[in-house]
Amino acid sequence: MEQTAEGLRRAQTMVDRWIRSTGKGYFSELTNMVMLTEEVGELARLIGRIYGDQVAKEGDLRKSLGEELSDILMVTLCLANQTGVDIGQAFLDGMEKRERRDRKRFEA
């Protein structure tokens, strides 16, 4: 589990380096929150077309699920960087909470 957290920390650092060098700086936290919402909407649209009852229109399936999930992760890591959140530690804390809270939740 610690390896996963370390991988998330490395991803967070990679995003920060890219934003500062290539991206030329972060958008505001509010703008990134709006972008995150947009990206989740794009994922929802794609899942609806692939797994739902709607028929895909031309261009609906241009992006893959992996690409959309990656976009969401990128913006999430930007928000973590901007707000001082160690996403690796936050992940570990969240998993620990779920282990404690849900240990017997799904037993029949």
Image (cartoon, helix red, strand yellow):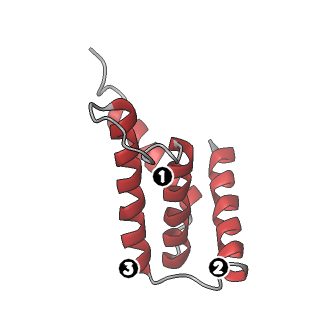
- Element under disc 1: helix
Q: Is 60 left or right of 52, judged from the image as shown?
A: right
Residues at discs 1 and 2 in contact (Cβ within 8 Å): no
The N terminus appears in which quarter of the rendering? Answer: top right
**In which image quadrant can residue 9 be found?**
bottom right
Q: Residue at image x 70%, y 66%?
A: 14
Q: Residues within 10 Å of mark 3 (few under 14, many from 20)?
A: few
Q: Residue at image x 26%, y 31%?
A: 53
Q: Residues within 10 Å of mark 2 (few under 14, many from 20)?
A: few
**In which image quadrant can residue 47 be found?**
top left
Of discs 3 and 1, which sits in the foreground? 3
- Element under disc 3: helix
Front-most of 89 and 75? 75
Q: Is 84 left or right of 38, judged from the image as shown?
A: right
Looking at the image, is mark 3 or mark 1 earlier in the sequence? 3
Amino acid type, mark 3: Leu
Q: For the residues marked 2 and 3, what is the alpha-carbon distance in whole angstroms?
A: 17 Å
Of discs 2 and 3, which sits in the foreground? 2
Specify the label residue 30 is tagged with. 3
Indicate the position of residue 32 as horizontal and vertical percent values: 44, 74
* Residue projecting furthest to the top: 108
Of discs 1 and 2, which sits in the foreground? 2
Indicate the position of residue 52 as horizontal and vertical percent values: 30, 32
The C terminus appears in which quarter of the rendering? Answer: top left
Above or below, 1 relative to 36? above
Residue bearing the label numbered 2? 23
